[in-house]
Amino acid sequence: MESAKARDRLNSVIIHAILVIFSIIMIVPFAWMILTALKTNQEAISVSPFYIFPHNGWHWENFATVWKSYNFLILYKNTLLMIFFRVLCACLTATMAGYAFGRLKFPGKNALFSLVLIQMMVPSQIFIIPQYLMVSSLGMLNTMFGLVFPGIVTAFGTYLLKTGYQGLPRDLEEAAAIDGCNIGQQFLRIMMPLTRSSMVSLGIFTAVFAFKDLMWPMIVCSQATTTTLSAALAKMQGQYSSDYPAMMAAAALAVLPMVIIYIIFQKQFVEGIATSGGKL
Amino acid sequence: MKEKKGMTKAEKNTAMWAYLFVAPTMIGLIVLNFYPIFNTIYQAFCKTGDFGKGNTFVGFANFQSLIVGNNSSEFWQSLLNTVKYAIIEVPFSIVIALVLAVFLNRKKMHGVTVYRTIFFLPMVCAPAAVAMVWKWLYNQQFGLINNLFGTSIAWISNPSIAWISVGIIGVWSIIGYNMVLFISGLQEIPGDYYEAAEIDGATGIRQFFSITIPLLSPTTFFIVQTRIIGALTVFDLMFMVMDKTNQALPKVQSVVYVFYTYAFTNGNKGMGAAVVCLLLIFILIITLILQSCEKKFVFYN
């Protein structure tokens, strides 16, 4: 009995040691980003001695300089608005379609739903050239509409919400129908509020992937005033590749808002992203 | 609308509502996704004029150039690069994630939330920023890695190791996501299996191989499938880490990187469309192979 306990304790020490090592590997890049951002460029490229921590004070002003010279206010605004509109469009269209596919009977349902599934199986790069040409011929390059365009509808979200609606108890609509609600009222008053958790998952999923997207904003919004954080970083890297503290400050400014929101709502984030991924 | 006989008034009413509800999504999918699929395939057979206008039909010329002609060495190399990237990213990220998930799923485990939050962190970060940071870590002269280990390895400009360095970033980025998927898979395995095994005196490692691995196989298969497709369409990391001037670029760039260069940097939409069509065919073949493996290796109760 005693030896079994001792073995358990040893196991758990080894396991925690492995987990801590991996945690360090995960955190070091972030820590190095912040530490570099707080140095002067001379410190950052000093090799002997090699500085881990800033040597001559912590240069928080690097953030302010980068903020101003790259106009982060506009980048934040563009990114936030793009995320807002994409989440709004995705939730609105997907909840309606998901309800119809999950709860209603209608001719052609399977055929229409197979279109949804096909869209999910095809690599998204195949849509990009025609989508770009459409935005371009509408004269909508470098606009918010252009940024939001591919995210107006979502096959994945439709699938996710369909699963959500199918999981609701059978007799809900019947009770509502007896009370004299038509289908629109049943949907709005009873069914939609019950799939709130699927909607939150879809919202977080959409927001995070819109935030991470690089190729689309680079293509449709090439100007510094109309683009998003990700695409702006790609541009900066080309222009200022030797000012390491500035680049790391820019990278930190680009990831920090999402990281902070994630740490506050980590449970919802992990569940939203992973469980919606897991249902695919 | 000509309805089938036998539809009652209520059924017609329901169908009307249903069409109303699916209309925005279906119209959107047709305009944004289905028209583009056919348009991309059409463009793959065209030579693009200036400003993306004035397509002239050229038959299989683009495909010929990619498969056997002028662009063939670049295209086949990029396909090989992509497969090599997948060979690093997929197995390593999955095996490490599985081990971490099993650890975090232990009974009476402390600190699960903290570990999970840390491992999942790269998932909410823009790959553009992540790649910038890693590029700086890999810097040959001033980078943390070389200075820490006293080496001077050209991590991302030596063609023979750069693909591994980029693969490592990919693994680092995706471990947490795979881990969380594994944890939810593990939680679906009934606890009685382990209790029975414990009574029979099976050790932890024995339990892992004879209970966890087979019962987790649907989750594992799902992760393998999504990771393979994800790895085959990798772009962001490569684009940010590998400059146009990097001498290792031809040995690292992925198919999607080549697609981007053709279609948007060089403005040759036709050639870009042909690349993405070939990628689609490749992915469909891989998907079919995976589907046939599913029956063999996946254990559904």
Image (cartoon, coloured by chain):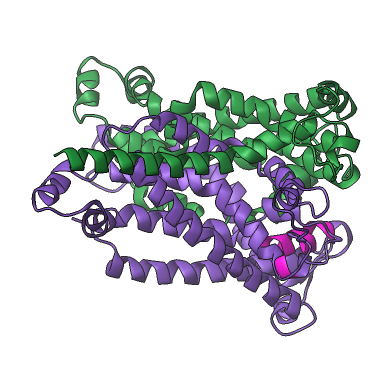
Chain colours: A green, B purple
Between B25 and A200, the residue placed more toward the observer is A200
Q: From the top left corner, tell me how far across and down residue A24 is, in percent.
A: 56, 39
- For the point 91% across and 37% down, the residue is A42
Q: Position of residue A91 (x, y in %)?
A: 50, 30
The reply to whether the magenta stretch includes residue B230 is no
Q: In this rendering, does residue A77 appear at all?
A: yes
Q: Residue at x 42, y 70 (%)?
A: B288
Quick one: quadrant of the N terminus of chain B? top left
**Rendered position, A186 above or below A134:** above
Which of B226 and B140 lies nearest the eye of the viewer? B140
Magenta residue check for B254:
yes
Q: Residue at x 36, y 27 (%)?
A: A195
Q: Position of residue A124 (x, y in %)?
A: 59, 53
Magenta stretch, residue numbers: B251-265
Q: Furthest residue to the top? A: A179
Residue A33 falls in which quadrant of the image? top right
In the displayed structure, B113 sits above or below B294; it is above
Q: Quadrant of the C terminus of chain B?
A: bottom left
Residue A151, by quadrant, is top right
